[in-house]
Amino acid sequence: MVRHTGLEPVSRAVWRSIAAKYACRACAVAPWTPDQVRGDERGNATPWSLTGFVNKLRAVFGSPFLFFISYFTVTHGCLPKKATTTLQKNAIILLPATAALILVGFIQPLDQKGFVDLMFIGRVVYLLDWSAPILPAAMVLLRFARPRPASPALVWPIAIIVFLIGLSLTFFSSAFASNLSLPLMVTQGSVLSLAVASGILSLAIGHSNSNTARLAMSGMVLSAVAAIWSLLSVPAAVFQANQTAASHPFCIAHHGSSADVDSLWDLRGFSFYTTATGYKSTSTWYFHGILIVEGNDGLQYFNWSPRHFRFDRIDHPERYIASLNNLCVPTSAFWKGL
């Protein structure tokens, strides 16, 4: 008998052999081969043919439901849900869910202005970096669309190479980052590299090598945890801004780019931090995000802390080299304008 553990459909002869074996256990006879299940040379029903097998089941068990399941198993090439392994069930549930979380937690708006200013190689690298959150979801969709899993011998080298390239680009870009943004940049790049590599490994889920499936799902889950952290930054920033403003007009802006926050997506953990430095790559002239509150004593400035999920008061804002003025205009309807 051929044992098959993949998600893909298998031939009708294999299912017939499987069903015949379990039916013969109940009837206390030897397992049948696919040739015995088909019948005699003329195609007539015999005690060892497909029709005889179904009749035997019905006679032994006397259950219309069992008869229907057995007949559907042999003729349509599918087993009841109980035959699906736990690993396959976990993959069917976890892969789409984690891929969706990675996509919404990491995807960034496409900077068209900055993209145009880049050279050809820079554009290619930028597009690869920008599309990284999309690739795990694309790999998962491709796996479910394929009738058969990919060979682990093929996907493993590709996954390792992609992971190493992602880490190399991450550490290269982090070399020019300030100490303030370095932890977030390294985390974001490393987790995205892991997510893409795990998505590639998911193409082999369903193969007899279950270790590949476990590693793929583990990598996707770890990446999804980081994406959840990024998404939790949105309600945290909204709550902290409302609490800090205390019904006074306020606004939120990026410091490095001197741009207003245009939507709630800009408040995600992997979006609401600065990559700007200053005169030198080691300078820390810029804050992650700025909350400006127009209080009774004038304008008050607060810096967003990704580590603590809160806005901290900035004392003596006039002393900083990178000006905090004119970043945005406080308003009483800030959230409505997003």
Image (cartoon, grey):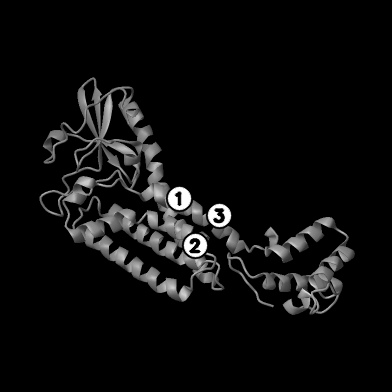
Q: Amino acid at mark 3?
A: Ile
Label 1, label 3: how far apart the Cα atoms are: 11 Å
For label 2, the SS is helix
Question: Compared with residue 136, is residue 42 higher up or lower down, i.e. above or below?
Answer: below
Mark 2 sits on what residue? 143
Tell me which corner region of the image, top left, top right, bottom left or bottom right, holds residue 232.
top left
Q: Quadrant of the N terminus?
A: bottom right
Residue at the (73%, 61%) spot, across then down: 72
Question: Compared with residue 239, is residue 198 higher up or lower down, i.e. above or below?
Answer: below
The answer to whether 303 appears left or right of 206 in the picture is left
Mark 3 sits on what residue? 93
Label 2, label 3: how far apart the Cα atoms are: 13 Å
Tell me which corner region of the image, top left, top right, bottom left or bottom right, holds residue 265.
top left
For label 1, the SS is helix
Residue at the (49%, 68%) spot, across then down: 204
Q: Amino acid at mark 1?
A: Ala
User: For this rendering, which residue is in front, 61 or 197?
Assistant: 61
Question: Which dot marks residue 100?
Answer: 1
Q: Horizontal and vertical percent for residue 212?
A: 49, 69
User: For this rendering, which residue is in front, 159 or 227?
Assistant: 159
Q: Horizontal and vertical percent for residue 56?
A: 86, 68
